[in-house]
Amino acid sequence: MSTVLTIARVEARRIFVSPLAWAVLFVLQLILGFIFATMLFGYAQNAQVADQYQGVADYIGGGLFGFATVLLLLVMPLMTMRLFAEERKNGSITLLFSAPASLIEIVLGKFLGLVVFMLATLLLLAIMPLTLLSGTHLDLGFIAAGLLGLFLMMLAFGSAGLFVSTLTREPTIAAVLSFGLLLLVWLIQIVANQQIPFAPVFGYLSLIGHFESLRRGIFNTADVVYYLLFTVFFLWLAVLRLDIERN
């Protein structure tokens, strides 16, 4: 476990030393802050629209979190593209393979380092709706469910991006492939909405379908299990891919 934490600490430091992480956080806050302010103004000015929702948490929190998923779909491939692709491009991946750590520890360590960035993103995002606590009856359970959904989705995005990063030596290619993979799993929901055989199966496989319940404040164990299985599956694929390369 200490090896995993050591790798995670090194990876988190490498992420935040890079100007990319700070640029991503800045752009995310800038865009989401604008969306938050716009939705807050709309809620205050249009009572008829506001009445269609359960409250400020539903209208602003749910809308903000829904928009955040689109941005994260674009951002997470940028944050995962360097995890292994850059190591391979620089030749330092041979040092990783020769280190006194198993491939599982290496993959988990790098992934936990990425999780630190995810938590920083989530914290900055959570501040926006929480600023309404003093002036509104904010449903904290609703906000917590939405933040949990975002975190689970980021874990899924991150694990898939990490796996794709093991397939190439070019970070840019890894980013494009990761985005394509995530968008494909996202858009499966469109197939699920059609009158076709096995539509419920496609619905279960869709990334966005499981997030919608959490975004609306509905906690379902099946949704949490889906994201955890998705994350573990792609981390396992990353370990297998690295094992093939090392041997």
Image (spheres, rainbow, N blue to C red):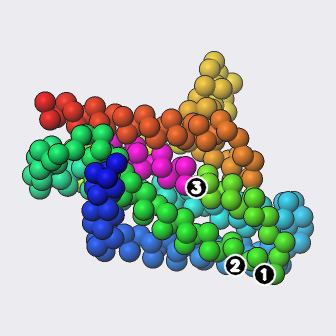
Q: In which quarter of the view is residue 220 placed? A: top right
Q: Which mark is residue 51?
A: none
Magenta segment, which residues?
A: 150-165
Q: Note whether residue 38 is visible.
A: no
Q: Dot 1 surroundings within 10 Å: few (below 14), some, or many (20 or more)?
A: few
Q: Nearer the viewer, residue 244 or 45?
A: 244
Is 17 drawn above or below residue 12 in the view shown? below
Residue position marked by numbered label 3 in the rendering: 150
Rendering quarter of residue 98: top left
Q: Viewer-proximal residue, 53 or 45?
A: 53
Is-magenta flag for residue 161?
A: yes
Q: Position of residue 182 (x, y in %)?
A: 45, 44
Question: Which one is in front in this view, the residue at disc 3 or the one at disc 1?
Answer: 1
The residue furthest bottom is 134
- Secondary structure under badge 1? loop
Q: Which residue is mark 2?
A: 131
Quadrant in the rendering for residue 135: bottom right
Q: Is residue 93 magenta?
A: no
Considering only order in the chain, which callout, 2 or 3, is on the residue closer to the N terminus?
Answer: 2
Left or right, residue 152 beside residue 78: right
Q: Which residue is farthest top?
A: 197
Q: Residue at x 89, y 72 (%)?
A: 47
Work out whether residue 18 or residue 107 is closer to the camera in this orientation and state it.
Answer: 107
Q: Residue furthest front?
A: 2
Q: Amino acid at mark 3?
A: Leu
Left or right, 227 with reference to 220: left
Label 3 neighbour load within 10 Å: few <14, some 14-19, many 20+: many
